[in-house]
Amino acid sequence: MKPPSDIQTQLLQLSFLSLLSITFLLHTTLSYTHRHLLTHPLSLSSALCALLYLLHRRLSRPRPVLLLNYSCHKPPPHRKCTYKVCESFVSQTAHLTPESVEFMRNIYLKSGLGDQTYAPPFIFTSDKVPTLEYAVQEAQEGMFSAVDSLLRKTRIEPGLIDHVIVTSGSFSPSPSLSSHLVNHYGLRPDVKSYNLSGMGCSSGVIAIDLASRVLKSARKVQYALVIITESISLNWYFGENRSMLVTNCLFRVGCAAALLTNDPRRRQDAKMELVDSVRTHHGADDGAYHAAFQEEDGKGNTGISLTKDLIRVAGLNLREHIKILAPRVLPLSQLGYYVCSVIAAAVARGGGAKPAVVPDFTAAFEHMCVHTGGKAVIEQVGRVLGLSNEVTEPARMSLHRFGNTSSSLVFYELGYFEAKGRVKRGDRMWMIAFGTGFKVGSLVWRFLCDSTQESDNPWNDCIDEYPVKDW
């Protein structure tokens, strides 16, 4: 669907405002006598200045950032990573010691993951060896599936896309993943592509934030395609370091694609509007910097180490993050309560005083997509923010159904809300995610329509089975 010309729209707006200005000035002139105008020579000048100010304000107003729609990749049924599949895979992997296998088994059984998550292609091959070919296959399957579905729903031709932003935390091939998309969909030669890597599970939020900044700064209507993916094939760990074996038990296949625009005329068929975004980076602290770290073990095996300090770091930096977010989103009642508690904590510092009370963010948001890094992470976020099990339900159920798909999982949570029919027009949603480094990112959305039952929602075939009681 080709949108109207942006230049034509701007000319029409200018013509209308010019006509309005002339009409107002003419009315002002005829309403005053010549004597009155001589007595008050600033009347016309004041009116003209006011009109020029309104004209400038109208033309310089930031463009909205609208999410037209999104799609989540759902691998085929034969890629399901059941407990039986996991047992078969590890039993056939010569690199893993019996002690490592037993450790992974215990972690898996306590992880909160169900029997319906999805594994990468190499898991189902005869040799069980992750290769670059399998990693590319995993990435392409997710990206192309999500984008195909998204373009069908939005009825946007690939030639209209101005920006392509791809984020993959730990897989960065050459040519880049954005180049794979440009080639596959035949995008325009002047399309602007961006590739984000090394930002962990927060990169999806960061990618949306980047898209919003690009669209807000544009002088014309543009479309940004954001793909949030991860390829875990080459990041599978075959060593004996237990802090690195944990990732094998948690991470699963997933991908999400989102289409955003700054065209205000698309508001009527958009799903959400991005109201605000906040990013904080806590890497200056060594503990936060090393909390999740890619490195080699003593035998040269590469893996991502999730330290025991990770949960503490997540809670501590979440508190720092909400100090910036709170004043921008909280209602005055909660904000006043929070400010008073911060002042009291600062005055009593050093005397064994308790930290500032965390405000009630459910007063600011009807829905929350909490970072689904793992069972312990969800529980820690719930403790820090004082959230009930009902609020964290989408995060817990997304982890159970899809595992940790890295930065795309907040969109699987969004799909859960919609499949349950819980979203109403005007509702506000908070997406929050953590990433290596250590980063925290927030997106604040406002829904522009009620929940819609879409055919590609990844929860369609199982939503009636959730929430599960045993988690």
Image (cartoon, helix red, strand yellow):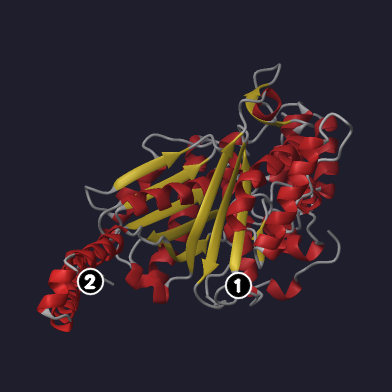
Which of discs 1 and 2 lies nearer the camera? The answer is 2
Q: Nearer the viewer, residue 450 or 10?
A: 10
**Residue drawn at (64%, 54%), measured in percent from left and top?**
118
Query: Can you tell which quarter of the image residue 354 is in?
Result: top right
Along the horizontal axis of the image, is 192 left or right of 248? left
Disc 2 marks a residue whose amino acid type is: Pro
Q: Are marks 1 and 2 in contact (CB under 8 Å)?
A: no
The circle on residue 4 is 2
Along the horizontal axis of the image, is 175 left or right of 141? left
Along the horizontal axis of the image, is 60 left or right of 117? left
Q: Nearer the viewer, residue 116 or 285?
A: 285
Judge the density around disc 1: few (<14), some (14-19), many (≥20) Cα neighbours within 10 Å. Answer: some
Residue found farthest to the top: 298
**Residue drawn at (51%, 76%), measured in percent from left and top?**
449
Q: Which residue is mark 1?
A: 418
The circle on residue 130 is none
